[in-house]
Amino acid sequence: MTNKKNKLFTFIISLIPGAGEMYLGFYKMGASIMLLFWGTVVFFGSLFPPVVYFLPIPWFFSFFHTHNLNNLPDDEFYALEDDYLFHLQPGDLKFLVTHYQKPLAAIMILMGLCVIWRYLYGGFQKLLALLGISSVWFSLIHYWIMAIPQLAAAVFFIWLGCRLFRQKKDSLREPERLEVNEKESAAD
């Protein structure tokens, strides 16, 4: 059962995204916010750093959501049910994994390649130092080598976004096709 808590402790704990909700007894909500926040840090922190600039959004959401929950009237607070942030159930996750299997596989492969790239780059950097490459050339090579994983991630996300738009466009056209087929079959 969820319980209202001390406002000082709630404030301190709410500074960690998701921890405030968990402190108030909303474990599913808190865990999903933590997963969103820290998953973004881990996944995008080294792969595609500009996304990290959006981290204040889930942090502020969690902070204010915790305080809004703690300040609700007792009857409303106790009526709330603990649910995941995106209202996904375990069966829904299986559907998402099977439906988006190729993009998820591509993301996993891209992540693995980025990790391998980082390790290989360390050896390549030492090789360049042994060859006596000048610092200007070395910094230029360093810039482009470090940009490859991020550029690959950017190209992948653009491709994935275009694919999703195309699927949405096709799904919007589907009712039109059905109407035309119905009219043609009715005319026959």
Image (tube, rainbow, N blue to C red):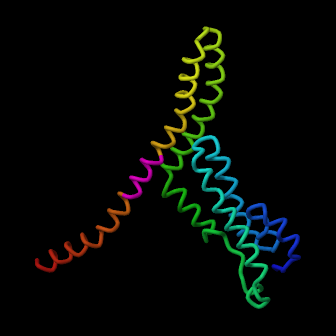
Q: Position of residue 130 (x, y in %)?
A: 65, 9
Q: Position of residue 47 (x, y in %)?
A: 59, 41
Residue at image coords 61%, 47%: 44
Horizontal side of residue 173 vs 133, given as left or right = left
Magenta: predominant secondary structure element?
Answer: helix
The image shows a total of numbered marks equal to: 0
Residue at image coords 49%, 49%: 103
Q: Position of residue 115 (x, y in %)?
A: 63, 34
Horizontal side of residue 60 vs 160, given as left or right = right
Classify residue 67 by image quadrant: bottom right
Query: Which of 69 and 105 lies nearest the eye of the viewer?
Result: 69
Residue at image coords 61%, 19%: 124
The extreme left residue here reads 188
Query: Which of 88 and 11 lies nearest the eye of the viewer?
Result: 11
Classify residue 27 by image quadrant: bottom right
The extreme top residue here reads 131
Quarter placement of the C terminus: bottom left
The extreme bottom residue here reads 75
Quarter placement of the N terminus: bottom right
Is residue 163 in the magenta section? yes
- The magenta region covers 157-165
Query: Which of 178 and 14 lies nearest the eye of the viewer?
Result: 14
Q: Position of residue 187 (x, y in %)?
A: 11, 79
Is residue 129 in the magenta section? no
Residue at image coords 63%, 47%: 43
